[in-house]
């Protein structure tokens, strides 16, 4: 009888992915790829992953998918560009921009600490959004939004970002749950209904 296969990824794999992601985010925020900027971002990313390690070392089903990692970064850059344009428009023409602030609690589809940590960083670094608090169990982000159209749209944006991270570093079961959540949010947005409750199996 063959021994069971251990599907837990080594802790260095998750740490390497987190360091790479945080370095990319740092360079995007600083809008520079100068060697000094990359080096500072790399040092800061390593320090953060050492100071705030995820629980348990590895995570069941954790996989690093290079192409999905590239897509994850592209998704973040698009969100960053869109948010910058929205904030710039709000500053130039606040009356036309329909500025509406709000604080929204966004429950996340259950995933690893690594995914939640990267998502918190991505949302925090996106102009116009600020993380006020984070509940871990269950995972809920309390977000202050500078331009809040509808709560459902904010929920969808956050969960879509979570999906891109899970595609790069997570497991397929979590990805399926996120797809179901996005479908429910899309239905609510199309019908003009309130945000549906998150159904956790």
Image (cartoon, grey):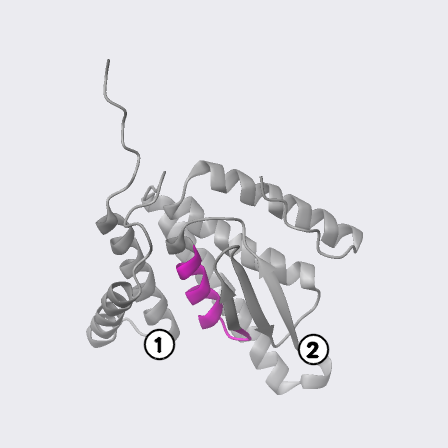
Which disc, if any, is residue 100?
2
Q: Residue placed farthest to the top in the image? A: 1
Image coordinates of residue 6 in percent, x first then y, are 27, 32
Q: Residue at x 53, y 38 (%)?
A: 176
Q: Nearer the viewer, mark 1 or mark 2?
A: 2
Q: Magenta stretch?
A: 116-130
Q: From the viewer's side, name the closer residue of 1 and 172.
A: 1
Which disc, if any, is residue 30?
1
Which disc, if any, is residue 11?
none
**Is 156 left or right of 117, judged from the image as shown?**
right
Mark 2 nearby-residue class (10 Å; few <14, some 14–19, many ≥20): few
Where 144 sits versus 49, above or below? Answer: below
Q: From the viewer's side, name the closer residue of 103 and 100.
A: 103
**Residue 119 is one of the magenta-drawn residues:** yes
Q: Residue at x 75, y 57 (%)?
A: 194
Which picture quadrant has residue 94? Answer: bottom right
Image coordinates of residue 125 in percent, x first then y, are 44, 71
Secondary structure beneath dot 2 equals loop
Mark 1 nearby-residue class (10 Å; few <14, some 14–19, many ≥20): few
Secondary structure beneath dot 1 equals helix
Which picture quadrant has residue 146? Answer: bottom right
- The number of callouts visible is 2
Where 148 sits versus 21, above or below? Answer: below
Q: From the viewer's side, name the closer residue of 141 and 44.
A: 141
**Is 83 left or right of 187, judged from the image as shown?**
left
Q: CA distance from mark 1 to mark 2?
A: 27 Å
């Amino acid at each position: 009888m063959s021994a069971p296969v251990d599907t837990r990824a080594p802790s260095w794999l998750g740490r390497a992915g987190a360091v790479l992601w945080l370095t990319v985010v740092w360079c995007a925020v600083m809008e520079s790829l100068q060697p000094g900027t990359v080096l500072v971002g790399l040092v800061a990313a390593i320090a953060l992953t050492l100071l705030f390690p995820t629980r348990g070392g590895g995570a069941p089903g954790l996989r690093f998918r290079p192409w999905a990692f590239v897509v994850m970064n592209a998704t973040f850059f698009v969100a960053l560009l869109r948010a910058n344009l929205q904030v710039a428009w709000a500053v130039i023409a606040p009356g036309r921009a329909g500025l509406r602030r709000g604080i929204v609690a966004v429950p996340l589809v259950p995933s690893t600490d690594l995914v939640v940590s990267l998502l918190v960083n991505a949302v925090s670094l996106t102009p116009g959004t600020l993380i006020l608090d984070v509940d871990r169990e269950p995972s809920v982000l309390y977000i202050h939004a500078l331009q809040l159209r509808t709560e459902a749209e904010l929920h969808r944006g956050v969960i879509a970002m979570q999906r891109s991270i899970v595609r790069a570093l997570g497991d397929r079961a979590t990805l399926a749950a996120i797809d179901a959540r996005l479908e429910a949010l899309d239905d609510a947005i199309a019908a003009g209904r309130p945000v549906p409750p998150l159904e956790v199996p």
